[in-house]
Amino acid sequence: GAVVSQHPSRVICKSGTSVKIECRSLDFQATTMFWYRQFPKQSLMLMATSNEGSKATYEQGVEKDKFLINHASLTLSTLTVTSAHPEDSSFYICSARGGPSPNEQFFGPGTRLTVL
Amino acid sequence: GENVEQHPSTLSVQEGDSAVIKCTYSDSASNYFPWYKQELGKRPQLIIDIRSNVGEKKDQRIAVTLNKTAKHFSLHITETQPEDSAVYFCAASMTAGNKLTFGGGTRVLVKP
């Protein structure tokens, strides 16, 4: 149990386009989902916290208009990178809280975004 | 906000030896300290965690110690095996399940 999936696993897009990444909790209801960003050989940086049915809480320095987060249901949160640029290229990982261990975060497999 | 420092950034050990990774945190309100193992291109996997009311926790070859007064905690891996090779991250949070602040990571290489 407690499986989190992300789609797509890898995406390449042109500069200026928008990309949507999905995070799903497959076998539990996630009241809270978190979005992290990880540059190569670096740590995970929290971007935002997303609660079902409410607006996401963004960390300092993260542009909310650029990284749109929607948490429309207890099993799905989406991150849309708008007008992507090469500097947005990164590994984006979501995590979900809930399920059998309500105090544990279960991580998705990540989405590697490359912006040309 | 919370700041977590992790050392060393890389660690090479001989198979069978022990590995120790240390982390310090800045926010005395943090009470939950998990450790994650991440293999290349994969998701972080929780390997052990400790809460502030406990000084030490052990799970087979892995142990974590916490010194809340000094605001530091450490991961100990004994009898290392090649499959222990990965990047290890410490993290801190106010409570379990809340947002995590990660350390910079330690790349561990276990040489056979």
Image (tube, coloured by chain):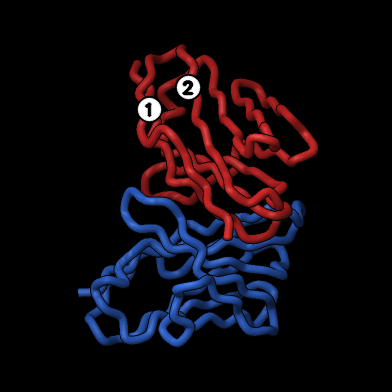
Crowd class of label 1 (few under 14; some 14 to 19; many from 20; radius 10 Å): some
| Disc 1 target residue | B11
- Left or right: where does residue B68 sit relative to residue A3? right
Q: Are marks 2 and 1 on the same chain?
A: yes
The reply to whether the C-beta atoms of the residues labelled 2 and 1 are less than 8 Å apart is yes
- The colour of chain A is blue
Q: Nearer the viewer, residue B3 or A28?
A: B3
* View extreme (right): residue: B53
Going from N to C along the chain, the mark reached first, 2 or 1, is 1
Residue at 80% x, 38% y is B53
Q: Which residue type does callout 1 highlight?
A: Leu
Q: Nearer the viewer, residue B84 or A9?
A: B84
- Left or right: where does residue B48 sit relative to residue B37? right
Tell me if I can see residue A14 in this picture: yes
Q: Quadrant of the N terminus of chain B?
A: bottom right
Q: Which residue type does callout 2 highlight?
A: Ala
Q: Quadrant of the C terminus of chain B?
A: top left
Residue at 54% x, 69% y is A23
Q: Which mark is residue B19?
A: 2
Residue A22 x/y as whole percent = 50, 73
Rendered position, B72 above or below B4: above
Q: CA distance from mark 2 to mark 1?
A: 8 Å
Q: Nearer the viewer, residue B1 or A2?
A: B1
- The colour of chain B is red
Crowd class of label 2 (few under 14; some 14 to 19; many from 20; radius 10 Å): many
Residue B98 x/y as whole percent = 68, 59
